[in-house]
Image (tube, helix red, strand yellow):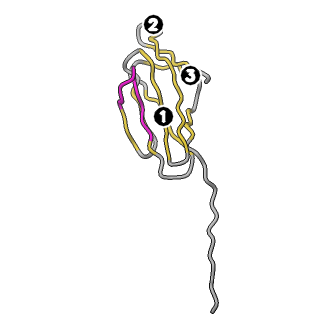
Amino acid sequence: MNFLNCFFFFNVVPAKVMLSDSTVRALKGYKISCSATGTPPIQTKAMWNSNVVVNASDVLTIFLNEEGWYVCEAENQFGKDKKEFSVKFAGKNAILVTQLIE
């Protein structure tokens, strides 16, 4: 009796949040994208002052209309990652976004 064994190998990669810039200068209402890499499926969410504002299974778009702490978080079955950044209005129509290094 012959047995055929098939093995499929693939890289197991934990979710990792990707933010394009650590500092962004923009007008109020500017949007920033938050995406993630890793082995799918990946669930992503954005939070503002600890409240979930966007859930997605792809790239998130966050509209920066409020000051406070924002978090982009990504999770798959192999891990979880998050990036925090602070939004402060800088002048009448501009805001400054600074990412915190963990």
**What residue is drawn where x is 58% and y is 28%?**
21
- Of mark 3 and mark 1, the one earlier in the sequence is 1
**What residue is drawn where x is 49% and y is 42%?**
75
Decide if residue 13 is on the left or right side of residue 55.
right
Decide if residue 7 is on the left or right side of residue 43.
right
Report the front residue among 26 and 97: 97
How many angstroms separate mark 3 from mark 1 (CA)?
13 Å
* Residue assigned mark 3: 99
Label ID, residue 12? none
Q: Residues within 10 Å of mark 2 (few under 14, many from 20)?
A: few
- Of mark 3 and mark 2, the one earlier in the sequence is 2
- Residue 36 belongs to magenta span: no
Instruction: Find out whether the residues at labels 3 and 1 contact each other: C-beta distance under 8 Å.
Output: no
**Corner quadrant of residue 102:** top right
Where disc 2 sits, the SS reads: loop
Instruction: Find out whether the residues at labels 3 and 2 contact each other: C-beta distance under 8 Å.
Output: no
Q: Type of residue at label 2?
A: Gly
Q: Type of residue at label 1?
A: Glu
Q: Position of residue 62 (x, y in %)?
A: 41, 30
